[in-house]
Image: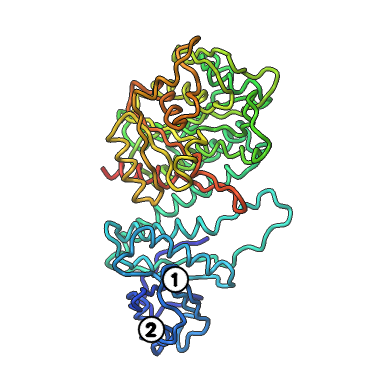
Amino acid sequence: MDYSIEIQPLDQLETDCIIVGVYKNQQLSPSATIVDDNTHQLIRNLIERGDIKGKSNETLLISVVPDSTIQRVLLIGLGDEEKFNLKLYRKALTAAVKALKTTQIKSVACTLAEIELNGCDYQWRCRQVVEIFNQNLYQFIETKSIKPTPVALSSVQITATEKNKDQANAGLVQGLAIAKAVSLTKYLSDLPGNICTPTYLAEQAIKVAENFANLEVEVLDEADLELLKMNSFLAVSRGSYQPAKLICLNYQGANSNKKPIVLIGKGLTFDAGGISLKSGGGMDEMKYDMCGGASVIGTLQAAAQMKLPLNIIGLIPASENMPDANANKPGDILISMSGKTIEVLNTDAEGRLILCDTLTYAEKFNPDVVIDLATLTGACLVALGRVPSGLLGNDDELCDDLIGASKTAGDSVWRLPLWEEYQDQLKSNFADMANIGGRDAGTITAACFLSRFAEDYRWAHLDIAGTAWRTGVNKGATGRPVPLLCQYLINRADA
């Protein structure tokens, strides 16, 4: 898909289709007014006839436009003008893409970036056009022998003026980077476990780094992990034929003395549950247990593409969790890299076992902050559904920054408490802690476990079990929380 900024006046614009907005009170957007004036009140006539009322996400494609270089007009309902907000703007863009996907239209000019939104400048609005279009046009076809008919749409122009073209171009740069990162994340997460192994994931990280001079990759194998005494991590991989990898991406966009932001993504390329075997129903979807790792690769790619003036470390512990005779067992005691001991009560609580050693490893980078993201607990899906990701952490400022970034990105989070009282659920008679805390507050006790390995720095944990993946008829990866992480990094760069 080709995206560009167009500052040519609408009466001179040549395009297969122009997208304009109509409010519920029948008020036209500025560009809709211009198009209407240039087409003998074509839009107002259709409104008066009742063909479109301007309700949110309502669409009407006008296929014949008299006396114009614009071939078609797509009207998008914006709803109540006083209530129009960030979420409704993104939904309007989504409605536009859906209306275009089934047509033979090849090029469109989108004017919706002109719609005023409180707290959202032209740069942000242009960025959203790219993100939303790209997200809704994504198709996973890698493993299909019969490829679906591709969408005809191949070019999107975002209209702007001389006054705001600099903001528009900045939004385009950000939008392209984030959209590409989301697509990469979705692609890696949608791949089956027999293709996307820990080794394959490492190879993809290396390919990404080859495109950027200031992005490097180091891949630690199991021998390296043994030397580091990452026994908790290695216990998870013991039952798998596929060797574990610790993928380390290093982006240097600032002075070397500037403390890095460390992102850690869970990279379970397939999770059968180990000896605590999962039930058969839905196990095919357990390939998505590496969405956190894929998101870190995507986010580092976006940061490098945007040339953010930050230092960022991406750590991805990658493994499978399989029920081999050599697999770790319930009742086993593990000595983590930190020296703390862990009683394994359930081998299906493996994500925290690979993350805890990686959190300890992160200390070597003297981080400013550490953010881990993981499809960690089904309990998060029960508590929050599929709308927000769960957020927990030991630093209020960091958590507040992530909440603010989530609102701007339209990639929501909800903070859960990390109170000391919950730590009691991890008590063990035989080790420093158990790896599960029982049925109650499963998301919180999982974060409590991780917090014991993040005591020496500012840390936040994102549980993306309900948001990184869609199930059902439309099952597949969402690319979240890449937009959230990219916005957080953009905010840090701006600060």
Q: Give the quadrant of the C terminus.
A: top left
Mark 1 lies on a secondary structure that is strand
Q: Give the residue type at disc 1.
A: Ala
Residue 330: image x %, image y %?
60, 18
**For the residue carrying disc 1, how many other residues have a C-alpha within 10 Å: few (<14), some (14-19), or many (20+)?**
many
Q: Where, by quadrant of the figure, is residue 399 drawn? A: top left
**For the residue carrying disc 2, how many other residues have a C-alpha within 10 Å: few (<14), some (14-19), or many (20+)?**
some
Q: Where, by quadrant of the figure, is residue 252 drawn? A: top left
Residue 473: image x %, image y %?
62, 53
Q: Is residue 260 visible?
A: no
Residue 193 vs 150, above or below: the answer is above
Q: Give the residue type at disc 2.
A: Asp
**Residue drawn at the location 43% of the way across and 65% of the way down:** 92
Residue 245 vs 406, above or below: the answer is above
Residue 289: image x %, image y %?
56, 36
* 92 left or right, relative to 269: left
- Identify the residue under disc 2: 36
- Foreground of the two, 474 or 417: 417
- Foreground of the two, 451 or 29: 451
Q: Where, by quadrant of the figure, is residue 20 drawn? A: bottom left
Mark 2 lies on a secondary structure that is helix
- Identify the residue under disc 1: 109
Q: CA distance from mark 2 to mark 1?
A: 16 Å
Residue 223 vs 285, above or below: the answer is above
Q: Is residue 224 visible?
A: yes
* 132 left or right, relative to 242: left
Pointer 2 and pointer 1: residues touching (CB < 8 Å)? no
Residue 431 vs 415, above or below: the answer is above
Task: Give the mark nearer the N terminus: 2 vs 1.
Answer: 2
